[in-house]
Amino acid sequence: MASLRDWLTERGLAAMLWWKSRPGSVEGALARHTFRRAASPSRNCVTVGLAQMRMELAASAADYALRVYRLTRAAVERGAQLVAFPEYTGALLLGLLPGVRELASGRSMQDALSELAGDTQVSVGGVFRAVAPAARKIYNETFSTLARKFGVYLMAGSIILPGKDGLLYSHAHLFAPDGRLVGAQRKLHLFSSEEGWLTPGDELRVFDLPFGCVAMPICMDHTYWETARLAYLAGTEILIDPAADDVGDQEWLAARGVRMRVQESPCYGLHVFMISDILGLHWRGRSSVYAPVGLLPPGRHVLAQAESDDQEQVVVRELDMAALRAFRAENAPEFNAELCAKYLPRVYADYCASERDGRRIVNRPSGGT
Amino acid sequence: MSKVAAIQLEFFRARSVANMEARLAAAIQPAVEQGAQLVVLPQHMGLSLLGAAGVGDDPLPVLKKKGAALLKAFEETCAGLAARFSVWLAPGSIVGAEGESLVAQAYLFAPDGRVIGRQRQTHLGAREKAWGVARGDSLDVFETPLGHVGLIVGQDARYPEVARILTLQGANILIHMAAMPAPFDEEAWRASLWREAQANQVFGVQACLVGECYGQIYAGRSAILAPVEMTEGGRGILAQSPTTEGEHIITAGLDLGALQKVVDGYPILRYFNYGLYAREFPRAYRRAAKVSAHGEPA
């Protein structure tokens, strides 16, 4: 049974978070600001904006909304009609919790939480769970309001929220120019540090927008070609990778994600990074717009790229959707359906059965599969 | 630790089977002298025999007529070379005939000259399609003392399904017999075996054909690859030919113990979403057949 102190602490925290996320907080913060509306994208052309963001904890709804506003405005003023944010945009709202901002320079999130919690046991998942009701309201209101006021498609990056089953998932959200939620995508492949407190989703979603089909699997999902392949085969033309990565500034390591995916499953790729130096999270990366080799200028590997890997920055680039469709018609992968039917997904099941206690043995004896 | 070599070779039209044997021996010998236990040659190496068969600009009539004999001559020659140098040999690929069908096929020979494995190309390039080559429908892993070897022929490297299937069947060394149309493009190169070595956390040995081969110019930078975490500068390259043209022999050591440490530290394959794949793959690849027909996903 929870102690009286725990009960009072939980009730007090809930009341404080309710107050911080009370209705109208975001609208009020944005009321005095100007909004230039984005032009409507055409079927054959869309201008995309990548909002490379710095992870600085937000103490209030107003603080959060203004940070997202500034990046969105910078992108829209340069013509963006679809603006994409990075992974963990919702995590900025951990700053709503008392004491977290003072601990931001800690060596790790767990260290910070341990210090915050004193003699009580607090897990990373527990903290995201605690802030979730308030974070959900502020995140949704911020991105929905900004999408509506700028008249722009907003891929809001990701937020950790409990599902109806009570488990925590990482969700990316897409808002339409009328502020409506188009849909959400759960992260499908976890990073090792997320194992144990986060649960992978089980559905890949593709959204049919006026300029083309968009999918937004999250960060590690792009390490697996399977994600991009399924998205491509469901019609995806723009593959968004909201990312947060401690090796994003190392070109060869970062190349293992969406940059390679767009070559094997021809799409445009938007790789948008969160930058961080807090809570032991040293995330870097140069947000980039990728395309199949045949649509790149000779000798280049990107259509556009951020100049900095450690600063907030907006990258804007027009995408010729007609050119992509022509390229795909000429260069469509020719799958070996018989081969795929023979091996996929059977080899995954065989492989999993062959692992020893979840460990892959790279030089296992024959007969291992 | 085992030592492997990738040989970047210019295509040549052999005057005879003996001429081809001498030419390949001249390429393999220095690699073996450098200590290589496994030697890899490029795609289309067997087509050099078409010169001996008197082919002009269009090889197809001869392939149809003498394809079976070409296959046999290539196999016997390469078996002899493997035994002569006492080396594991992946001598590249050949287009030949089996029964009524043309096939594009690669090999792995043991140091005693035995054929350890044959691997048919499972996804065809423009040339193979124009010739009516039948694609393979099987991917196999061959066990050697150096590691478990999967063979990737030409265009198959563009399809990540191939390397994944081989890896999940136990391959830890992927060999790519390559022929990349010129001009060389760094990003396209990276999106071949380099990408697969990273995605599957395996070693990669890639030998590229260069020069003119029946109307197509090829360029490439042959490479020996590994996960970025275990290579100097974090580039994923253990050795690479210095230029995209000309002949080069590159060698490197493959340390399976070091590879195990990389996998233990960053266990990518542990986080598969099997439920998603099991539910979606069958219908996605049924749709894929329509993609091939229309150029756009259904």
Image (cartoon, rainbow, N blue to C red):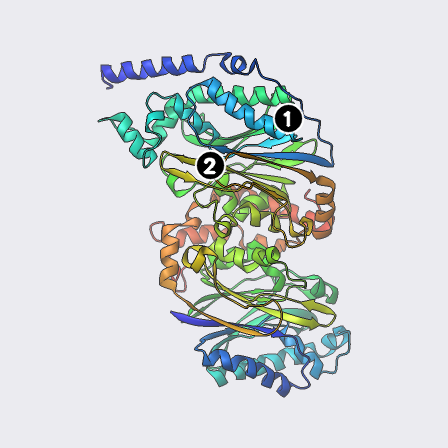
Question: Amino acid type of disc 2?
Answer: Ile
Chain letter, disc 1 residue: A
Q: Residue at (74%, 64%) from the top-left corner? A: B130
> In the figure, A132 relative to A108: above or below?
above
Res B215 quadrant in image: bottom right
Q: Can you identify the residue that label 2 sits on?
A: A275
Residue A116 visible somewhere in the drawing: yes
Rendered location of residue B203, percent (x, y):
46, 62
> Residue A136: percent from the left, percent from the top?
47, 22
Q: Nearer the viewer, residue B16 or A20?
A: A20
Q: Are marks 1 and 2 on the same chain?
A: yes
Instruction: Say if mark 1 contacts mark 2, CB within 8 Å.
Output: no
Q: Kindly report which numbered mark, 1 or 2, lies closer to the viewer in this rendering.
A: 2
Q: Quadrant of residue B36?
A: bottom left
Q: Residue at x 69, y 42 (%)?
A: B298
Residue at numbered disc 1: A152
Secondary structure of the residue carrying tag 2 is strand
| x then y, percent, for residue A345 | 52, 49
| Chain under numbered label 2 | A
